[in-house]
Amino acid sequence: MTQTTEAPAGNAVGQSDTPTRAAKVTSTFAKALNAALADAMEADPAVLMFGEDVGPLGGVFRITDGLTARFGEERCFDTPLAEAGIIGMAVGMAMNGMRPVVEMQFDAFAYPAFEQVVSHVAKMPNRTKGKVRLPIVIRIPYAGGIGGVEHHCDSSEAYYAHTPGLTVLAPATVRDAYFMLREAIASPDPVVFLEPKKLYWSKEEVDLADLRRTFDDGEAPRRIGRAVVARAGTDATLITYGPSVPTALAAAAAAAEEGRSIEVIDLRSIVPFDDETVSASVRRTGRAVVVAEAPGFASVASEIVARVQERCFHSLAAPVLRVTGFDIPFPSPKLEHFYLPSVDRILDAVDDLQWED
Amino acid sequence: MSAVTNQGREHATGSADAPALQSTDSALLPSARPVQLVDPDGHHTPDERYPSPSDESLLGAYGRLVAGRRINDQANALVRQGRMAVYPSSHGQEACQVAAAVVLREEDWLFPTYRDTVAVITRGVDPLEVFTLLRGDWHSGYDPYEHRVATQATPLATQLLHAVGMAHAAKLRGESTVVLAMCGDGATSEGDFHEALNFAAVFHVPVVFFVQNNEFAISVPLASQSVAPSLAHKAIGYGMPGERVDGNDLAALLAVLGSAVSRARDGGGPSLVEAHTYRMQAHTNADDATRYRSADDVDRWIPKDPLVRMRSYLSGLDLLTEDGEAALAAEADAIAAVIRKGLNTDVEINPAELFEYVYAEKTTQLREQAEQLCEELARAVEPAAAGPDSAASRTEGNQR
Ligand SMILES: Cc1ncc(C[n+]2csc(CCOP(=O)(O)OP(=O)(O)O)c2C)c(N)n1
Ligand SMILES: [Mg+2]
């Protein structure tokens, strides 16, 4: 086994958005999303926020906290309880010059809106040869790891990723949460914005005012369609996104103690997919494991495996493996830890990458 | 109370603590009989609530009615000739089609369905652009912003929510736009229908929901769709007025829809209008209506034909002369000729366009796929230059 020098963990590699500061200011993922919404609404009066309980309450996860008070109930408001209604209305508003951001209260409660998403949000620009653009952001608190009961923990990304016309994003860091939401709202294309619930309370040393200045000055590097090397390494690549990024980073740290240098790619953007960054990494390391929380069958993880083997076949020393959720409905709170990709399961997969050959 | 939503109701402090019904609530119910201003024989049947449209506007709309019928006939013929994949005809419903378009102003929006081709053309959209969908060279052929006509919706009732969003945005922007959204009787069973009415009422936005009750959803009769006293009765459940109108009476349609549009424009909020009409032909040319209804059923509606009725009425008042009628027929023929000529000319299709409008900017993957298709096509036109392993020679091989 090769001994390697370790690159710094976390977001340091490939990121240089914020000038380093002496003062220790921290923010949570949730607060960064809240700030991104407020800053986008401040910057553009066409940006509206609506959904269920997003008004005075600020959303069940408080992501829209304070927006109604600050921008008025015409710009951040509660709708009747009907998800197709929320997204269908957003379509009409976007046709009339608005940039609606809508919140689906939980992943599984976005399903009533599926027809509007698939048949209209995704297809309207294509149907009209680009005459009608739908700059809509569908925010979805998503995935498990929070001990949620049934219908509150689904990883629904494959449904959206399989639908041409949708951009599908899943941030994993506080900084990305801010910049990616701003970028999503500014995008001319509809975006499904997946917010890993279990990361809402994660913290980073960031000054949100700095992030705002960086974004407003156009100095934030593009993130849609761009994966990032979250941790550099030389022996194998873990390809992951959203809620599984911290788990993959922890696995890479543990592997380092065993003397293996593992690179972690945080996709950030599921669609468009950054083949270039992913393939470059796997060609360098020669081994790869895809880590994702959704059931593995016909999943985004499967797609990544296919793409990697199509592009990197001659660089691969072992088949590309997957660590995903089992092909079962998301389990109850007391059982979810059996289901979720864990550090151990990832390390086992890394061990299985035919090192002895 | 929210500024963006409807007037909240006062909660009565009665023993049950439930809101007391207001005496005006029953005014939301539709008329006992569909509003009619001209009976099937062409006689004026005044209704004090709905003043008759002016002779001038009736005559103008009648011209569109003649053209509408001609468009339906022409489109059916083009399907038979194989120039169009399919056509959901509005034969028998042309009065609804024309009225829906002419009651709107330029700044208003129309949200039509697949059956509302005549309404879309009446609103001013180029017929050849409209038929793009059905001839099959793209999903929608017109720019919705040009005449403020949304794409013709196929997924039932989904467009009603878009109409609500359009109106909601217009209201927030202080525009005087009214949105007229069309659907069929069957579509009123869809969830989106209910969500759209509820959202429109709660946000108090200027939308007129216009249901053409033609008694069938493909093969399923209205009785299997709803047992409500009428479809217009659904309005009161959302706190908006519902009205019923004779859907084969152009004058009544203009009056009732016109009043609903004015109400919406004046800040009165949404309303629902149900037109009682009949689908005289099969659902589309691909459907066999004899499997679910008899010729007698259809024949009963022949005397109620909207065109004949309006012609009798206008002729009876000496507003329509033989010359006038001939002039309208010639105009309709001219439109049909344009449609015929356009659809008999093959349009050039550009397969590279398949990848153009999926995202504002092509993704790397779409660029690769576009190149792949482009190469395949290049090889197909140069079979001589192709080597033994080329796709072109493989295709030839397969054909042998
Ligand atoms: C969501 C959805 N389900 C099913 C269909 C297939 N479909 C097309 S038209 C139609 C009947 C609709 O009847 P109605 O609303 O009365 O309109 P009409 O065709 O009579 O004008 C059906 C079932 C569809 N287009 N959309
Ligand atoms: Mg019908």
Image (cartoon, rainbow, N blue to C red):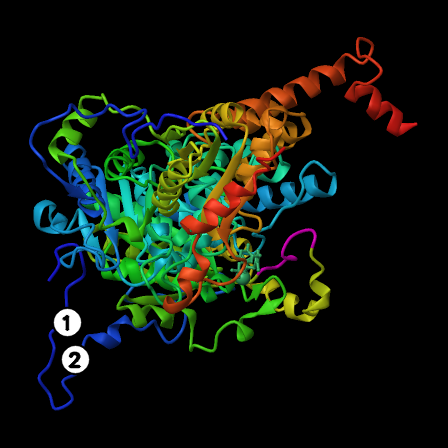
Residue farthest top in this picture: B385
The answer to whether residue A110 is left or right of residue B40 is left
The answer to whether residue B173 is left or right of residue B142 is left
At mark 1, the secondary structure is loop
Q: Which residue is located at x 68 percent, y 39 percent?
A: B78
Percent x, y for residue B262?
25, 52
The quarter in which the C terminus of chain B is drawn is top right
The quarter in which the N terminus of chain B is drawn is bottom left
Closest to the observer, B137 or B50: B137
**Residues in magenta?**
B279-286
What chain does badge 2 belong to? Answer: B
Query: Badge 2 is on which residue?
Result: B19
Please tell me the numbered disc located at residue B9. Answer: 1
Closest to the observer, A138 or A18: A18
Please tell me the numbered disc located at residue A244. Answer: none
Ligand 2 sits in quadrant = bottom right
Percent x, y for residue B371?
60, 20
At mark 2, the secondary structure is loop
